[in-house]
Image (spheres, rainbow, N blue to C red):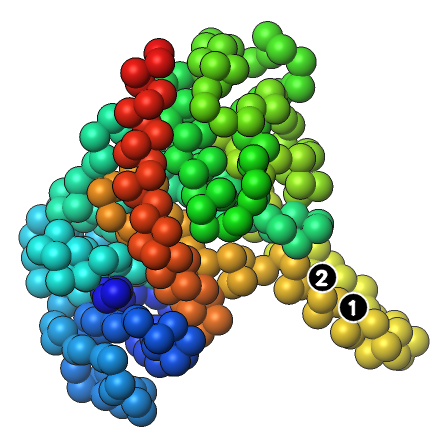
């Protein structure tokens, strides 16, 4: 198995990507990595070239670039080349921590959608209090969803949680403003009816306040609502830790208490950290394309590689294609 990794995207590139890649090839016996980026910069950090191939380029897509224009004009950008490795059959999956919109554009343009999937979904794993996490689809790939899109998100999310996360009979919930049947706007009402007849364990409507309590394993919504949920969780977690730090450094007594409780705070931070969950998958493409968080460190990139590895190993995209075809036949 070979995974193409854009080593030029992200806040800690290329060091975090290269260290994660070396760790990954030691962890997975049949894994080979293609490191896409500036060869001189890669070799500054690459201390073990076992199972490594370098694809040299000096061009990269910046976070400030307009996604569609950048992908079409910067054909030799590290992100584009990584995705093209998948299209041309030299890699089984691609990963980048760069410009999200550009990666979605490159994935659609070069890898293409699975037959039967109208719109791909950007789906991260988010933390829960029990440490198991939940999958949220969509967080911004499509701002204006249709009921049939949400049904497809549910099928893809259910397949991923079963095959990659090992969850038996995942609980699939529809994000809504209340748990009662008939709640919401026309989109959620129609999606609810469709999902009731889906080939998965649909538990009905779920509210945003219950997500971190682990109310569902898969939560489905349109990209507009999903992006707000994602940013709200990230912002709340960051604010909470800032407030704690401020309070615990106010006085000598507080600092003393903070020293005693430091291991507990580390445990809380670990539970709320994205780094252990991998990246956000672009579900609905013919091959795995993973968007790692822009601020990913070595640990986060490693788990994104593990995520891509598991998706290829478990043939998730093939199973999604089969499940979507079955659902469409029954509809």
| Residue 245, image quadrant | bottom right
Spatial separation of the CA atoms under disc 2 and disc 1 = 6 Å
**Residue 68, numbered circle:** none
* Mark 1, residue position: 264
Identify the secondary structure beneath mark 2: helix
Q: Identify which residue, 164 or 22, lies in the foreground.
A: 164
Q: Identify which residue, 131 or 79, lies in the foreground.
A: 131
In the image, taking residue 200 as reference, residue 89 lies left or right, namely left
Residue 268, compared with residue 18, is above or below; it is: above
Q: Residues within 10 Å of mark 2 (few under 14, many from 20)?
A: few
| Residue 290, image quadrant | bottom left
Identify the secondary structure beneath mark 1: helix
Q: Identify which residue, 17 or 324, lies in the foreground.
A: 324
Query: Which residue appears farthest toward the right when viewing the image?
Result: 253
Residue 44, compared with residue 328, is above or below; it is: below
The picture places residue 260, in percent across and down from the top left corner, at 86, 77
Residue 182, compared with residue 100, is above or below; it is: above
In the image, taking residue 273 as reference, residue 41 lies left or right, namely left
Q: Are marks 2 and 1 in contact (CB under 8 Å)?
A: yes
Please tell me which residue is depicted at 92% across the width and 76% down the height of the picture.
253
Q: Quadrant of the N terminus?
A: bottom left
Please tell me which residue is depicted at 12% across the width and 75% down the height of the picture.
56
The picture places residue 65, in percent across and down from the top left corner, at 22, 53
In the image, taking residue 263 as reference, residue 164 lies left or right, namely left
The picture places residue 124, in percent across and down from the top left corner, at 46, 47
Numbered disc total: 2
Q: Residues within 10 Å of mark 1 (few under 14, many from 20)?
A: few
**Residue 268, numbered circle:** 2
Instruction: Determine if residue 246 is in view.
Output: no
């Amino acid at each position: 198995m070979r995974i193409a990794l854009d080593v030029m995207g992200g806040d800690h590139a290329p060091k975090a990507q290269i260290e994660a890649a070396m760790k990954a090839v030691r962890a997975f016996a049949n894994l080979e990595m293609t490191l896409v980026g500036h060869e001189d910069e890669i070799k500054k950090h690459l201390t073990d070239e076992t199972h490594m191939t370098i694809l040299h380029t000096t061009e990269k897509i910046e976070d400030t670039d307009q996604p569609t224009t950048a992908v079409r004009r910067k054909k030799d950008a590290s992100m584009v080349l990584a995705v093209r490795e998948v299209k041309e059959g030299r890699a089984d999956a691609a990963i980048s921590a760069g410009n999200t919109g550009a990666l979605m554009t490159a994935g659609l343009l070069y890898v293409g959608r699975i037959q039967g999937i109208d719109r791909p979904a950007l789906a991260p794993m988010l933390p829960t209090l029990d440490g198991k996490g939940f999958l949220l689809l969509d967080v911004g790939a499509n701002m204006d969803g249709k009921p049939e899109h949400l049904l497809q998100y549910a099928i893809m999310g259910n397949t991923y949680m079963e095959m990659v996360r090992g969850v038996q009979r995942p609980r699939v919930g529809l994000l809504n403003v209340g748990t009662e049947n008939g709640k919401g706007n026309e989109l959620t009402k129609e999606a609810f009816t469709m999902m009731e007849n889906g080939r998965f364990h649909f538990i009905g409507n779920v509210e945003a306040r219950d997500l971190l309590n682990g109310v569902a394993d898969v939560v489905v919504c349109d990209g507009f609502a999903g992006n707000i949920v994602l940013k709200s969780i990230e912002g709340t977690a960051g604010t909470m830790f800032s407030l704690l730090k401020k309070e615990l450094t106010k006085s000598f007594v507080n600092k003393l208490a903070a020293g005693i409780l430091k291991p507990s705070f580390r445990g809380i931070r670990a539970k709320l950290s994205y780094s252990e969950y991998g990246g956000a998958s672009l579900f609905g493409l013919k091959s795995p394309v993973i968007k790692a968080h822009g601020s990913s460190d070595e640990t986060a990139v490693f788990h994104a590689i593990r995520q891509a590895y598991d998706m290829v190993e478990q043939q998730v995209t093939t199973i999604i294609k089969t499940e979507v075809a079955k659902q469409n036949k029954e509809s």
